[in-house]
Image: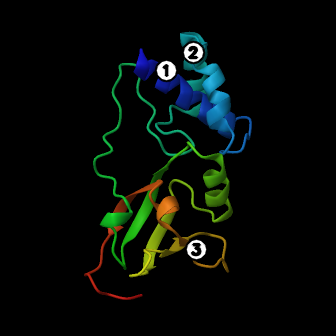
Amino acid sequence: MALEAIRHHRQVELYLAEALNVPWDKVHDEAGKWEHVLSEDLEDRIDGILGHLTADPHGAPIPTRDGTIDDRSVFYQRSELIVGTSATITEVSDEDADLLRYLGELKLYPKTEIEMVSISPIDGLMTIRPYLKVRNLDNPVIGEKVSNCISVTILQQDKPGKES
């Protein structure tokens, strides 16, 4: 039953974001109102409209109807990244709407490829380079609170000590 509620919640989040263009910082709270009343028929219709997608707008996996869920053990957190690491943002926490708005301003969404440019040895501030189609964006600097809310999949990792 719990996985079914999670499935409904994440499907509704995705539907609100993709079909109704609700901002990603608002879909979590709104989906919480729908998840317990979503019928199987409506669930199937939403799934069909969205093309059977496997993750919500924040990158969290949508469980299948039979209860299977993507393995997230291959994702990394900030403490595991070194300078020169290239990665794809896979998931961000959806618990803080202010954080989501901030990440949106920085264009740091799931599926965005990034490179770790530098990590401050004093306070751990991380400078990252997002690979976006939009040019002339500064490389954002994020702190521990923000970076701890982001999970990534490593694409390639250079040798330790390499500076970009």
Which percent across, then down, holds residue 58? 54, 45
Q: Residue at x 65, y 46 (%)?
A: 97
What quarter of the picture does the C terminus occupy? bottom left
Residue to which mark 1 is pinned: 5
37 is higher (above) or lower (below) than 119: above
Q: Residues within 10 Å of mark 2 (few under 14, many from 20)?
A: few
Residue 49 shown left or right of residue 1 in the figure: right
Q: Earlier in the sequence, mark 2 or mark 1?
A: 1
Callout 2: helix, strand or loop?
loop
Callout 1: helix, strand or loop?
helix
The dot on residue 119 is none
Q: Amino acid at mark 1?
A: Ala
The dot on residue 140 is 3
Q: Nearer the viewer, residue 10 or 113?
A: 10
Residue 97 shown left or right of residue 62 in the figure: right
Q: Amino acid at mark 3?
A: Pro
What quarter of the picture does the N terminus occupy? top left
The dot on residue 36 is 2
Q: Residue at x 48, y 74 (%)?
A: 125
Which percent across, then down, holds residue 51? 55, 33
Quarter assignment of residue 120: bottom left
Q: Residues within 10 Å of mark 3 (few under 14, many from 20)?
A: some
Callout 3: helix, strand or loop?
loop
Q: Amino acid at mark 2?
A: His
Residue 118 shown left or right of residue 28 in the figure: left
Q: Earlier in the sequence, mark 3 or mark 2?
A: 2
Which percent across, then down, holds residue 52? 50, 31
Q: Earlier in the sequence, mark 3 or mark 1?
A: 1
Q: Nearer the viewer, residue 7 or 101?
A: 101
Mark 2 in CB contact with mark 1 (< 8 angstroms): yes
- Number of numbered tags placed on the structure image: 3
